[in-house]
Amino acid sequence: MIAIFYGFLIGCFVTLIGGGGATFYLGVLTSTLGMSTVVAVPTSLLIAVFALFSGMVTQWRLKNIESKLGNRLIIAGIPGIIIGTAVSRFIPVAVYNIGVGILLTGMGLIVVIKNFRKKKENDKANENSKVAPIFGLISGLMVGFGGLSGGSATVAGLSIMNVPAVKAAGTTTYVLWVLAVVGLVSHLLSGGPISWTAGLYLMIGGVAGSILTPLVLKQFDPKKINKFLSPFIGFVIMYFGIRLFF
């Protein structure tokens, strides 16, 4: 039951901020359930795939997904996964953590600044933004290097492109589901073991949380939610970035 509870909390949180949650699932599997990293990594990806799918379906029905932007991010992200997977073995973890930490801290700071400055009338979501493929590539690289930490880059990029927080989180769920499937398939093809029992309990909680959260947010004024959620997402991204330095 504790695994279902943890899964539910993670499903709620990652759906709120936009993310895959594999990093959180990985933490529960290793620290709480005592699972080895070799088994926990593909298991966390499996959980995230199903939790993301259920959340994506709910977000799609609530019209919180900018599919045009999402597709551009996905197209750029898939090559990033391939590149990240290929070169990850040659880059020390410490170097990777510092680079990603600087990147996430900077993007989180930009999101916070953009949301505290005075909004302009022409500050609308730019579906044709030329920087979209850049953020997609960064997200794919981060997924390829080891998990779904690419969600922070995706939601930060969408926020920087003036996508409202609720839709940024919804679109990120869509993008990460596709990237998660690619990542999971690559692990399965390489023979990565999966703990189906532990994964099932976390998956049940994660699916429930990912479905419930957008339905609850739907009951509130989108403008008020965006006013609170946008800077919150920025601070969370900065937090994850700063954590990589320690």
Image: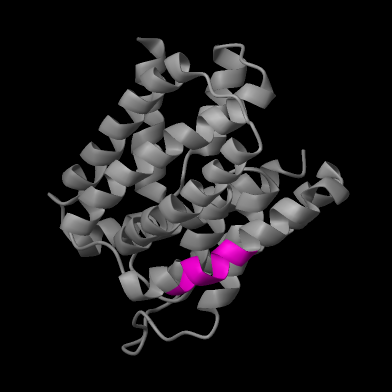
Q: Does 76 appear in magenta? A: yes
Q: Residue 159: image x %, image y %? A: 44, 68
Q: Is residue 57 left or right of residue 102?
A: left
Image quarter hosting the C terminus: top right
Q: Is residue 118 left or right of residue 27?
A: left
Residue visible at 50% across and 61% down? 154
Q: Residue 157: image x %, image y %? A: 51, 68
Residue visible at 38% across and 21% down? 200
Q: Nearer the viewer, residue 82 or 54?
A: 82
Magenta-colored span: 72-79
Residue visible at 37% across and 57% down? 174
Q: Would residue 94 be visible to someone looking at this image? A: yes
Q: Is residue 42 above or below residue 176?
A: above
Q: Is residue 51 above or below residue 95?
A: above
Q: Nearer the viewer, residue 194 or 213?
A: 194
> Based on the displayed image, in which of its 4 quarters is residue 41 positioned?
top right
Q: Does 159 appear in magenta? A: no
Q: Residue 13: image x %, image y %? A: 39, 39
Residue visible at 60% across and 40% down? 189
Image quarter hosting the N terminus: top left
Q: How many marks?
A: 0
Q: Residue 178: image x %, image y %? A: 44, 55
